Amino acid sequence: MTAGLHVLECVNEATLLVRARTTVRPRVALILGTGLGGLADAMTIETVIPYADIPHFPVSTVESHAGRLLLGTLAGVPVVAMQGRFHRYEGYDLSQVTFPVRVLHALGATTLIVSNACGGMHPLWAPGDLMVIADHINLLGDNPLVGPNDARLGPRFPDMTEPYDAALRAAAHAAARTLGLTLREGVYVAVPGPSLESRGEYRMLRRIGADVVGMSTVPEVIVARHAGLRVLGVSLITDQCLPDALEEATLARILAVAAQAEPSLTRLMMQLLPELAA
């Protein structure tokens, strides 16, 4: 966002630019995480807008994030998809990281689907598994809502009793059963990164109740709930983070697992989206 401008002014400027370039009025918004941008291949795309063209948008610096806003349809549902997201470890503050969520809401989306690649700490789960996020733990050391609150954007103290909508989670499980897919459910913990965790850190995270760990998602969900969006979160486990059997993780391996498992995520979304938009 541009210094000196109010958040709402920045949102309006970004929204006007996007609306001027597309006829799509999205009902569902998607944020596609590391290695998961291929879900866009299943979309019927009308409009592609590089983030650099959108006023006040940050620019993706992570090599696996394309940095494009896509508008079109998926399974017949009007959608807007972020092909790449932003992270605190890139040097952005959380208001910048979450600014696009404000724009997705302003474009008309009422449901947000967030996806991510993550490390799995549950001993019975394996790389390639999908997990619906039931709850999260914020260990980023910050919150995107810190600072003055504009009631036009949301309440001062948004409730986080149920950040991930129970009905959407149930619908995801029903879709997975229809497709014969295994779908886990658990708790996601967000850490700053970009270094991966040590054995001691994995032990701590597991003991405080986390099933998977990543470096994103939680700030976006906080802002989405602040704005009144319903949220569904899906994590793709790309590496197994068991302290006593820990193997070195590389980006190449993470991306390879994500590529192998992504067709399952795409099938799940194709099955689920018509019901979400009904």
Image: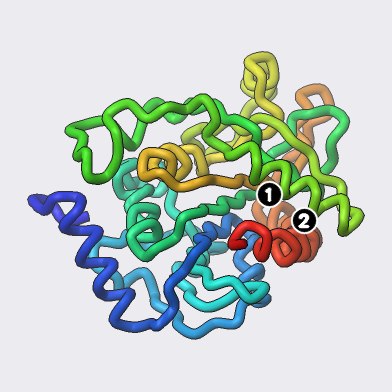
Query: In which image quadrant can residue 148 be found?
Result: top left
At label 1, which amino acid type do we have? Answer: Thr
Asked which secondary structure carries label 1, the reply is loop
Secondary structure found at label 2: helix
- The one of 192 and 234 positioned closer to us in this rendering: 234
Q: Nearer the viewer, residue 36 or 199?
A: 36
| Between marks 1 and 2 in the image, the one whose residue lies nearer the viewer | 2
Disc 1/disc 2 C-alpha distance (Å): 11 Å
Q: What residue is shown at x 61% (from left), y 52% (from top)?
A: 115
Tell me, yes or no, whether the two marked residues, 1 and 2, touch with CB atoms within 8 Å: no
Category of crowding for the residue at label 2, using alpha-carbon neighbours closer than 10 angstroms: few (below 14), some (14–19), many (at least 20): many
| Residue at the left extreme, as displayed | 4
Q: How many marks?
A: 2
Q: Which residue is mark 2?
A: 257
Q: Position of residue 146 (x, y in %)?
A: 27, 30
Q: Residue at x 80, y 49 (%)?
A: 174
Horizontal arrangement in the rendering, residue 129 relative to residue 88 (left or right): right
* Residue 72 disc label: none
Q: Is residue 87 above or below residue 263?
A: above
Q: Which mark is residue 250?
A: 1
Depth check: 167 or 106 in front?
167
Q: Dot 1: few (<14), some (14–19), or many (≥20) neighbours within 10 Å?
A: few
Decide which of tag 1 and tag 2 comes sooner along the chain: 1
* Residue 37 vertical placement versus 116 (above, below): below
Name the quarter where the N terminus is drawn: bottom left
**Colour style of the rendered protein structure:** rainbow
Residue at 29% x, 70% y: name it: 54
Q: Tell me where residue 261 sits by quadrant.
A: bottom right
Residue 85's x, y, as percent?
47, 56
Amino acid type, mark 2: Val
Give coordinates of residue 25: x percent, y percent. Answer: 43, 73
